[in-house]
Image: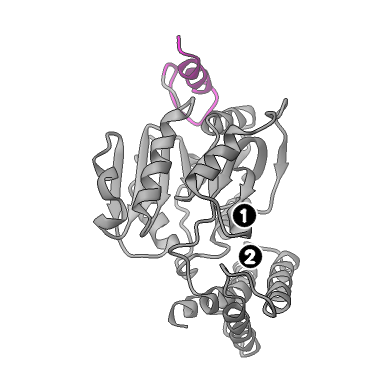
Amino acid sequence: MDSSVGQRANMCRKMNEPSPGKHPKICLIFATRGRAELLKLVIASVDSQTVRPDLIMVSCVSDEDVGDVASRPGLLVVKGRPGLTVQRNTALSHVPGDTDVVIFLDDDFLMHRTWIAEILDALESDASIACITGTVLADGIHGPGFSFEQARAILAGMSSFPESKTTVPTGGPYGCNMAFRASSIVGLRFDERLVLYGWQEDRDFGGQIWNRGGRVVRINTALGVHMGTKGGRVSGRKLGYSQVINPLYLVRRKTMPLRDALDHVVRNVASNILRSFAPEPWIDRRGRLRGNLIGFWDCVRGRLTPERAEKL
């Protein structure tokens, strides 16, 4: 028997409700817009996984967002309104009822070939785990970003693989790569007031799971590279506003502790102030700082309105 099939068959005895002989059903979701060529490469790379998803779902806005990927067997395209949280919710409403594991990946995240297998192994090992985020080997979001070829080279150039799995509790998943036990997110949705790029929408979703009593963890063996592709991202002013308003809004929703929210706000605003004197070419630091100031003014007036970012 193929090792991946055997692994999945073994897991069915411990995860959710699948009956003996039935492997866990996996739905892999990409929310995307305006990156059809990159999406095509990333989806093609899923074929190298030692355990493959039963369904790949692409949540987009128009046909141009997916290109010819739409004709790929085993792939479902769903369309709706734009916005990361909205598009993820559109996908959630189409997840088949017999799904056991729901995975969300950014369209610029490249998995190590064992990423899905490691996620399944972690879920099997502890029934209290509801959400898992992997370990990012390199994150282009902190720099000019990586091309697909660079990301693939980083994975190929790994000097070693972790000898043992380490599971660490975390305040929330990293939205570029996160997996959920389907039974733990029944009825949950991403907050659509967190518009555009979302900004902390992953932390809010994880907080909802924490409030239900589920464990949210990070493991060191589900590896990948976040390319941090810059095309399609929001303006500096819009993001700067979200950097201030969204964490404080999550405090009110009870999905983020006040200390964590203040840490997020202080670090981002301080970084924007310091780097606005010599900004990176790929970041609109001054625009972000202007957005920060608008956000502070709204806070002073008692207006925690994350949706305002869309109109700035």
Segment tinted magenta in the rendering: 1-21
Q: Residues within 10 Å of mark 1 (few under 14, many from 20)?
A: few
**Coloration of the structure image:** one colour
Q: Residue furthest top?
A: 1
Specify the amino acid type for callout 1: Asn
Does 15 appear in magenta? yes
Q: Position of residue 67 (x, y in %)?
A: 27, 50
Identify the residue position indicated by label 1 in the image. Answer: 211
Classify the position of the N terminus by image quarter: top left
Identify the residue position indicated by label 2 in the image. Answer: 254
Q: Position of residue 179 (x, y in %)?
A: 53, 42
Residue 155 makes an appearance in the image: yes
Of residues 104 and 223, which is closer to you in this image? 223
Locate residue 75: give its quadrant. Answer: top left
Name the residue located 54 percent from the left edge and 75 percent from the top edge.
236
Q: Position of residue 112 (x, y in %)?
A: 55, 34
Name the residue located 34 percent from the left edge and 52 percent from the top edge.
36
Mark 2 and 1 residues: CB-CB less than 8 Å, in contact? yes
Specify the amino acid type for callout 2: Lys
Asked if residue 295 is positioned above or below residue 246 in the image, the reply reads: below
Does 13 appear in magenta? yes
In primary-sequence order, the first of circles 2 and 1 is 1
User: SS of the residue at dot 1?
Assistant: helix
Q: Position of residue 79 (x, y in %)?
A: 28, 56
